[in-house]
């Protein structure tokens, strides 16, 4: 079954949006198979966002994402990578995200866009392995 990595960023955590965001994905029908509240080290931030190294916003991005706790999650379900990006708002910039999506409803500016989600299956594998040990990923009992 497809898996994706989602992370509520420090702005979303401090604005008490964890419950609302988790609820949206639960109600959609996806399964939360791992989660943790954690503060990202500078090394992890730079590794996670390595593709943006050298861009003008890179240093600000690293200092923002390490500025307070994030809520890291792994979600599982059919087509969860693409669908979760639609639920987040499609666009990175909350100003361009449709109302009814997470960024569209709760975000205002690009560098405070509340949530990160993997953009491909390769990114999902890489990001899940960066943040979680394989043993932390749960399996649901199909008989319940
Ligand atoms: P995210 O999906 O986590 O991936 C990279 C992040 O960089 C992005 O969300 C934004 O929060 C942040 N960012 C800040 N400025 C920019 C920018 N000009 N273009 C793209 N991403 C940006």
Image: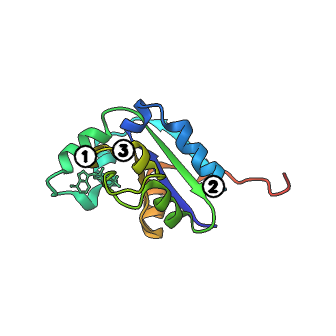
Q: At 28% from the left edge and 45% from the top edge, which residue is drawn? A: 109
In the rendered structure, which disc, 2 or 1, sits on the residue that comes first in sequence?
2
Looking at the figure, which quarter contains the N terminus?
A: bottom right
State whether residue 48 is above or below residue 79: above
Where is residue 82? Give x, y as percent: 49, 67
Where is residue 112? Give x, y as percent: 31, 43
User: Viewed as shown, does residue 28 lie left or right of 95?
Assistant: right
Ligand 1 contact, mark 1 (Cβ < 8 Å): yes
Name the mark nearer the viewer: 2 or 1: 2
Can you identify the residue that label 2 sits on?
28
- Calculate the distance from the C-alpha at mark 3 to the C-alpha at mark 1: 16 Å
Can you identify the residue that label 1 sits on?
61
Circles 3 and 1, Cβ within 8 Å, touching? The answer is no
- Front-most of residues 94 and 129: 94
In the rendered structure, which disc, 3 or 1, sits on the residue that comes first in sequence?
1
Can you identify the residue that label 3 sits on?
107
Q: At 31% from the left edge and 52% from the top edge, which residue is drawn? A: 95
Q: At 44% from the left edge and 69% from the top edge, which residue is drawn? A: 122
Name the mark nearer the viewer: 3 or 1: 3
* Neighbour tally class for label 1: few under 14, some 14-19, many 20 plus, Cα within 10 Å: some
- Front-most of residues 104 and 56: 104
User: Viewed as shown, does residue 95 lie left or right of 26?
Assistant: left
* Neighbour tally class for label 3: few under 14, some 14-19, many 20 plus, Cα within 10 Å: many
In the rendered structure, which disc, 3 or 2, sits on the residue that comes first in sequence?
2
* Neighbour tally class for label 2: few under 14, some 14-19, many 20 plus, Cα within 10 Å: few
- Calculate the distance from the C-alpha at mark 2 to the C-alpha at mark 1: 30 Å
């Amino acid at each position: 079954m497809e898996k994706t990595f989602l992370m509520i960023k420090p702005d979303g955590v401090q604005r008490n949006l964890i419950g609302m965001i988790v609820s949206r994905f639960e109600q959609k029908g996806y399964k939360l198979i791992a989660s943790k509240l954690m503060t990202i080290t500078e090394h992890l931030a730079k590794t996670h966002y390595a593709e943006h190294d050298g861009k003008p916003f890179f240093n600000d991005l690293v200092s923002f994402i390490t500025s307070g706790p994030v809520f890291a999650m792994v979600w599982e379900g059919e087509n969860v990578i693409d669908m979760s990006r639609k639920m987040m708002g499609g666009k990175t910039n909350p100003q361009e995200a449709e109302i009814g999506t997470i960024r569209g409803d709760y975000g205002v500016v690009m560098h405070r866009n509340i949530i990160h989600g993997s953009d491909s299956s390769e990114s999902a594998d890489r990001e899940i392995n960066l943040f979680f040990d394989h043993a932390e990923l749960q399996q649901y009992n199909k008989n319940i």
